[in-house]
Every structure is written in structure tokens, then in C-alpha cells.
Image: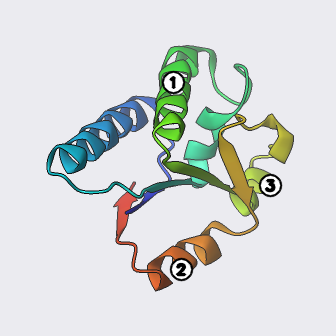
Amino acid sequence: VYFDVSLKDDKLLVFRMELLDRTFKQMEEAGLEVTGVVGFRGGASRFITKGDDYVLEDEVGNKRKIQDWVTRFAKKGIVIEQCFIAADIFDIPAEDFLPEVTVVGNGYISLAGYQAQGYSVIPMD
């Protein structure tokens, strides 16, 4: 499954991350082998960077929650990707992303590649 995450609202993004976790757990409980990718682009890009930069002061608490989800997902073997085009639009250098994040040149091309391999795409916007 490829989850396409582009939300810019921190509260809604935290909620979506909780739903992703629940979805992954339910898949595992059903005996399915979970092969997942969470692809970030758009406004969601700001929340998977190191430190508290790139977000407003009132978004810092939720940014930390989102960062915790990213770390947990990566430990489960879920791939976390960031579109470089989106990062560039927000003036975020590739080295400012969390170490669990793989920056890809173009998130759309990556998404298309996963679709070609049979991944289902679920938009999270």
C-alpha cells in the first residue's frame, strides 16, 4: 500500500497518522504481510524535518507527534519518502529531513513506480 500524504494541517495530519497506524495493525492482525510506503509531499513536508523549524510555534507539539509516528513506522519496515520537488518549493534542503526519510527526486514518479509494482494508492489529503 502507498499512502500519499499531502496534508498541511497539523491536527488533521496527526489524526491521519493515527489512522495509518491502526490500518497497519489491522492488516497485521489479519495475517497480511504489510508492505507499505508513506509518501510525503506538499504541506505535509514541513512536519518530517529535524528540529522545530519549518512550522509555526503552535504546530510544534503536533510536529513532534508526527515525527514519532514516522520513527515507529520506519522501525516496522514501512518506507517513508519525501518528494524533493515539494521540499524545494518549501525551501527545505534534503539534509533537514529526519534520518528515516528517503528523499526522492519526484514523488509522482515514485508513486507511479509503486503502482506499476502493484501497490494500491490511498490519498491522504
Disc 2 on helix, strand or loop?
helix
Image quadrant occupied by the C terminus: bottom left
* Nearest the eye: 59 or 112: 112
Q: Which residue is mark 3?
A: 88
Quadrant (top left/top right/bottom left/bottom right) for the N terminus: bottom left
Cα distance between the residues tagged 1 and 2: 27 Å
Residue at position x 51%, y 24% in the image: 68
User: Label 1 sits on what residue type?
Assistant: Asp
Q: In screen coordinates, is 89 left or right of 100? A: right
| Amino acid under disc 2 | Ala
Secondary structure beneath label 1: helix
Which residue is rendered at x = 63% and y = 22% of the image? 56
Decide if residue 57 is on the left or right side of residue 122: right
**Of callouts 3 and 2, the N-terminal one:** 3
Closest to the observer: 93 or 25?
A: 25
Tell me where residue 6 appears, x and y as whole percent: 50, 53
Q: Identify the residue position indicated by label 2 in the image.
A: 112
Label 3, residues with CA under 10 Å away: few <14, some 14-19, many ≥20: few
> Residue 51's image quarter?
top right
Q: Residues within 10 Å of mark 1 (few under 14, many from 20)?
A: some
Q: Amino acid at mark 3?
A: Asp
- Residue 7 % position (x, y): 47, 47
Location of residue 57 in the rendering, given as x and y in whole percent from the top left corner: 62, 15
Element at badge 3?
Answer: helix
